[in-house]
Image (spheres, helix red, strand yellow):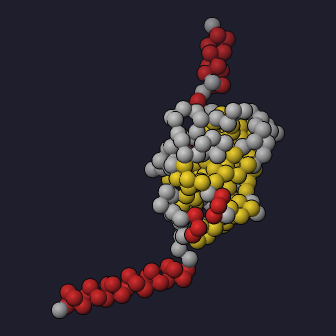
Amino acid sequence: MRRKLFLIALSLLIGSPAFAVPTLQLFISGATYDWGTQTWVTTSGSFDLYVVSANSSKTDVIVSLALAPTDNPADVSVNFAGTDIHTGDWVFGYSPLENDPTQWDGGNDDLPRHGIFPTWFSEMHTGAYNRSSWVGDVQPDAYGNFWNPANGSGQAHARGQVKHFHVTTGGVFTFVHFDAYTLNSDGTINQFAPFSHDAEAGYVPEPGTAALFSTGLMALGAISFRRRKR
C-alpha cells in the first residue's frame, strides 16, 4: 500500500505543471517583468536578448521584431547581433514573412495577434537549438522567483539551449516587441513562445530630446501660471 501511494505521489510530482518549461521563451537581461502585459520590458537602448529553447531540438528559431502600427520604420534604427535592420526590411502585416503578411486567417498560418499584429515587423533567423544544457521558466512565480538565463540562477527542470543576441535601438519609436517561433515545412507556425514569455524594448528619449521636452513643459507651466495670475 505504501509503495502504491509512493508511486502515485511520484507520478504527480513528475507530471506537475509547476515544472513545465515552455518550448520557447524570451528574456532581456536587466529588464523588468510587466505583469499587466506579461512581458519582460527594458527601457535601455542597448541590451542582450535571450532566446531559450526547451524540450526538443529545433532546426531554426525565428525572432520577430515588431513596432507599433503608428511608428514610422524610417525613424527607427535597430541592430540585431551586428545586423542592421533597414527601413525596407520592415513589412506591415502579420508574421511570419513565410506567408502572405497582409492576410491572417486565425489558424496556425500566422502568429496570433496578441495585441501586437497587424503592425510593422521584421524577422531574424537565429539558427538551430539542441538539448545540451538545463533550462528553466523565465516567467516569475507568485513569489517573484524565476530562472535567469543571463546568470543561470533559479530552478531549471528541462533540457535545452540558450542563445543571446545583443540588440541596440535608436531613433523615435513606441516599442520594439519580440516574438519567437518555429515554422512547419509549409511555412505555418509550429511552436511559439507563450505571450506570457515575451520581451519588449520601450522607447526612451535621447538626453537632448528629453531636455528639450522638459524645457517645453517648464515654459507651458510658466505661461499657465501667468494666465492664472492675471
Q: Nearer the viewer, residue 29 or 177?
A: 177
Residue 212 picture location, percent across and down: 47, 84
Residue 147 picture location, percent across and down: 65, 46
The quadrant in which the N terminus is found is top right
The quadrant in which the C terminus is found is bottom left
Q: Nearer the viewer, residue 195 or 71?
A: 71
Q: Relative to 202, is 52 above or below?
A: above
Q: Is residue 59 left or right of residue 12?
A: right
Q: Nearer the viewer, residue 176 or 56?
A: 176
Q: Relative to 167, is 198 above or below?
A: above
Q: Is residue 70 left or right of residue 134?
A: left
Q: Relative to 137, is 76 above or below?
A: below
Can residue 51 be seen here?
yes
- Taking the spot 43% from the left edge, 82% from the top edge, the residue there is 214
Q: Relative to 171, is 82 above or below?
A: above
Q: Residue furthest top?
A: 1
Residue 21 picture location, percent across and down: 64, 36
Q: Residue furthest right?
A: 132
Q: Residue furthest left?
A: 230
- Taking the spot 24% from the left edge, 91% from the top edge, the residue there is 226
Can residue 141 be seen here?
no
Q: Is residue 208 left or right of residue 167?
A: left
- Taking the spot 71% from the left edge, 64% from the top edge, the residue there is 84
Residue 109: quadrant of the picture: top right
- Taking the spot 51% from the left edge, 43% from the top edge, the residue there is 113
Count of marks placed on residues: 0
Residue 151 picture location, percent across and down: 72, 54
